[in-house]
Image (spheres, rainbow, N blue to C red):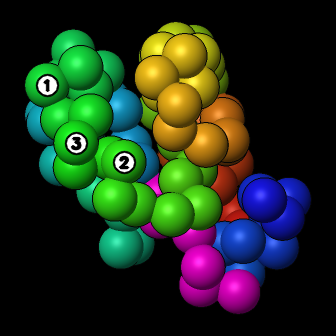
Amino acid sequence: MENIEQLIKSGKATIIDVRSSAEFMGGHVAGSINIPLQQIPQRLDELKKMENIVLCCASGNRSGQADMYLKQNGIACKNGGTWMDVNCYC
């Protein structure tokens, strides 16, 4: 995978925001997909079909947890940290 900034700027990234739906509705990266952290295990099949996954959340903690879980399940991804950080690359 390319670095996070390159992926996002090139439009190749699939940005997954793992915050709650309410947090997501309060502001998010344009074009990002909201999959709350607790739904990640049930949506593995969907995530396996995605490429260049960049995860984000409010602080980087939940996206870090999702990053570890997805990698343990064979899904390549990167932890982008906060959604505001990821948004800066757009």
According to the picture, the residue beneath numbered tag 2 turns out to be 48
Over which residues does the magenta segment extend?
10-15
Give the amino acid type for the residue marked by disc 3 in the picture: Asp
Q: CA distance from mark 3 to mark 1?
A: 8 Å
Q: Residue at x 72, y 71 (%)?
A: 7
Q: Is residue 6 magenta?
A: no
Q: Is residue 11 magenta?
A: yes
Residue 75 or residue 27, whichever sits in front = 75
Residue contact between numbered discs 2 and 3, judged by CB atoms under 8 Å: yes
Position of 34 with respect to 15 (left or right) is left
| Pair 1/2: label in front | 2
Residue 74 in the image: state x and y as whole percent: 53, 31
Secondary structure category for the residue under label 3:
helix
Q: Residue at x 23, y 20 (%)?
A: 41
Q: CA distance from mark 1 to mark 2?
A: 12 Å
Residue 5 or residue 83, whichever sits in front = 5
Position of 44 with respect to 73 (left or right) is left
Residue 75 in the image: state x and y as whole percent: 51, 38
Q: CA distance from mark 2 to mark 3?
A: 5 Å
Secondary structure category for the residue under label 1:
helix
Residue 22 visible in the picture: yes
According to the picture, the residue beneath numbered tag 3 turns out to be 45
Secondary structure category for the residue under label 2:
helix
